[in-house]
Image (cartoon, rainbow, N blue to C red):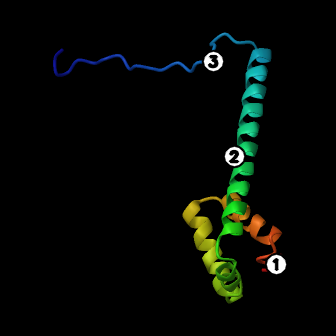
Amino acid sequence: KGEGAHTKPYYITPMFWDKYATQEEDMASATATLIISLIGLCTCMACLVKVLSYITMNSNQAMLKKAARMDPYFAIIVGTCVTLFVQSSSITTSVLTPLAASGIITLEQ
């Protein structure tokens, strides 16, 4: 083809997309997608908590307790940095939940 030739853009059609779908079909597919995503989210969060519980139970608890006794203002800065680094407050909360459940840190900390 020549240098100035215009080619037709190539579009990928989503697997479950139907141009002429009814509102009921759209609602059914949206509901199914929501249910699948919630199951996936809950499964991943449960696995994350189990893994973090295993890690905290098998790691050096003295080191974790020493880290938990740091200056509160410095702890806020560290927590903010960790949350920014992983870009998710859910992950930070999931890390802290097993630590609080095992008694390594208190709820006030």
Position of the C terminus by quadrant: bottom right
**Of 53 and 31, which appears nearest the observer?**
53
What residue is drawn where x is 75% and y is 70%? 99
42 versus 17 height, above or below: below
Residue position marked by numbered label 1 in the rendering: 106
What residue is drawn where x is 77% and y is 32%? 35
Q: Residue 58 at what x, y percent from top left?
A: 67, 68
Residue position marked by numbered label 2 in the rendering: 44
Position of the N terminus by quadrant: top left
Q: Earlier in the sequence, mark 2 or mark 1?
A: 2
The picture quadrant where one finds residue 60 is bottom right
What residue is drawn where x is 77% and y is 17%? 23
Residue position marked by numbered label 3 in the rendering: 16
48 versus 103 height, above or below: above
Task: Residue type at mark 2: give it.
Answer: Cys
**Of 51 and 76, which appears nearest the observer?**
51
The picture quadrant where one finds residue 41 is top right
Determine whether, in the image, residue 3 is placed left or right of residue 90.
Answer: left
Q: Earlier in the sequence, mark 1 or mark 3?
A: 3
Task: Residue type at mark 1: give it.
Answer: Thr
Q: Residues within 10 Å of mark 3 (few under 14, many from 20)?
A: few
Quote the CA–CA distance across marks 1 and 3. Answer: 48 Å
78 versus 101 height, above or below: below
**In the structure shown, which secondary structural element does the residue marked by tag 3 occupy?**
loop
Task: Residue type at mark 3: give it.
Answer: Phe
Residue located farthest toward the front when viewing the structure as drawn: 58
Q: Earlier in the sequence, mark 3 or mark 2?
A: 3
**Of 97 and 33, which appears nearest the observer?**
97
Quote the CA–CA distance across marks 3 and 2. Answer: 25 Å
**In the structure shown, which secondary structural element does the residue marked by tag 2 occupy?**
helix
